[in-house]
Amino acid sequence: MMSEPTPFTVEQFYKFIGERKIMGVKCEKCGKIFVPPRPLCSNCLSTSLKWIPLRGKGRLLTYTMIYVAPERFQHLAPYAFGIIELEEGVRLPGIIQGVKPEDIKLGMILEVDFNLDVPSTWPQWPRYFFRPPQQL
Ligand SMILES: [Zn+2]
């Protein structure tokens, strides 16, 4: 059976999240990677794109503490919301968990983990978060 072509949409990005995958879209012409995905390369305007898996590991670029959150996130507050730059060079925003606010440092290594218990009635809920690499 042929696998169905997957559209380069944010919806599809979240479907991959549901499969515990962080996927980006890579331009086959210039090599630029996009998250969230887009159907057209903003760098060279090529439409020759493909999905590639991202390793989901990167460095914290910036973060802010959220004390007053949207209602559905309020039970998590206060929480840190940051942007990490993945090893592939793309930036991904998300909530940081598993580290005390005073221990959060710019440049620290964080990994993507998944929170798939979230009700699917919130399709825009980021069903992933960042946490420090787990010690084995
Ligand atoms: Zn391109």
Image: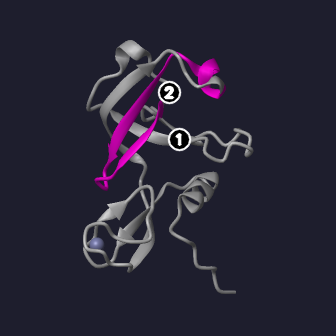
Determine whether label 2 and label 1 are within 8 Å by CB: yes
Whole-percent x, y for residue 61 in the image: 28, 35
Front-most of residues 13 and 135:
13
Mark 1 surroundings: few (<14), some (14-19) or many (≥20) residues within 10 A = many
Write down the residue under mark 2: 97
Assign the N terminus to one quadrant of the image.
Answer: bottom right
The amino acid at mark 2 is: Gln
Residue 75 lies in the magenta stretch: yes
Q: Is mark 2 within 8 Å of ligand 1?
A: no
Q: Is residue 105 above or below residue 49?
A: above
Quadrant location of residue 99?
Answer: top left
Number of marks present in the image shown: 2
Give the structural element (helix, strand or loop) at label 2. loop
Mark 2 surroundings: few (<14), some (14-19) or many (≥20) residues within 10 A = some
Q: Which residues are magenta?
A: 72-95
- Point out the residue furthest to the bottom here: 1
Residue 136 lies in the magenta stretch: no
Image quadrant of ligand 1 equals bottom left
The amino acid at mark 1 is: Asp
Front-most of residues 117 and 122:
122
Q: Is residue 130 above or below residue 69?
A: below
Whole-percent x, y for residue 116 in the image: 67, 43
Write down the residue under mark 1: 113
Whole-percent x, y for residue 125 in the image: 61, 41
**What residue is rendered at 38% in x and 80% in y?**
48
Q: Is residue 78 above or below residue 110?
A: above
Quadrant location of residue 75?
Answer: top right
**What residue is rendered at 33% in x and 52% in y?**
90
* Disc on the earlier residue, 2 or 1: 2
**What residue is rendered at 30% in x and 23% in y?**
105
Give the structural element (helix, strand or loop) at label 1. strand
